[in-house]
Image (tube, rainbow, N blue to C red):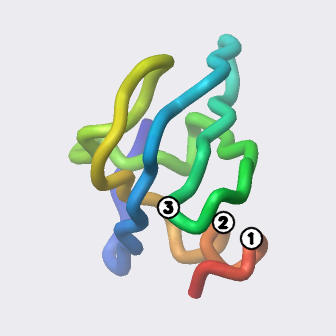
Amino acid sequence: MAEWIDEIEIDVDEVIVETDDAILAMLEDGREEWFPKSHISDNSEVYKKGHSGGMIISPWIAKQKGLA
């Protein structure tokens, strides 16, 4: 995990799958999206299977997923 100058926080209902390199998150709007762990902030409260709440991600991945 990492930190960036500009971070984006998104609401995650639940992390439903976790691998060594990524998580599959169910977003507040019902979409399921994969996020590389390298683009999730160290300050995020969501980063592993079963977690829910605010997930802080890099601006780049937010833009790629249409979240910014």
Residue at the image point whose x is 44% and y is 46% from the top: 13
For label 3, the crowd category at 10 Å Cα-Cα, with few meaning under 14, some 14 to 19 and many 20 or more, is some
Q: Secondary structure at mark 2?
A: helix
Compared with residue 45, is residue 55 higher up or lower down, i.e. above or below? below
- Give how far across and how far down residue 68 sits, in percent: 57, 87
Occupied quadrant, residue 67: bottom right
- The kind of residue on which mark 1 rests is Lys
Q: Is residue 60 left or right of residue 45?
A: right
Contact (Cβ within 8 Å) of mark 2 with mark 1: yes
For label 2, the crowd category at 10 Å Cα-Cα, with few meaning under 14, some 14 to 19 and many 20 or more, is some
User: Which quadrant is the N terminus positioned in?
Assistant: top left
- In front of the other: label 2 or label 3? 3
Residue identifier under label 3: 28
Q: Is residue 17 left or right of residue 52?
A: right
Residue identifier under label 2: 61
Image mark for residue 65: 1
Residue at the image point whose x is 35% and y is 38% from the top: 52
Mark positioned earlier in the residue sequence (2 or 3): 3
- Give how far across and how far down residue 36 sits, in percent: 67, 40
Mark positioned earlier in the residue sequence (3 or 1): 3
Q: What is the distance, in whole Å, between disc 2 and disc 1 at their CAs?
A: 6 Å
- The kind of residue on which mark 2 rests is Ile
Q: Secondary structure at mark 3?
A: loop
Occupied quadrant, residue 42: top left
Looking at the rendered structure, the number of numbered marks drawn on it comes to 3
- Give how far across and how far down residue 45 sits, in percent: 24, 40
Q: What is the distance, in whole Å, between disc 3 and disc 1 at their CAs?
A: 14 Å
- The kind of residue on which mark 3 rests is Glu
Q: What is the distance, in whole Å, between disc 2 and disc 3 at their CAs?
A: 17 Å
Residue at the image point whose x is 66% and y is 45% from the top: 35
- Give how far across and how far down residue 15 sits, in percent: 53, 31
For label 1, the crowd category at 10 Å Cα-Cα, with few meaning under 14, some 14 to 19 and many 20 or more, is few
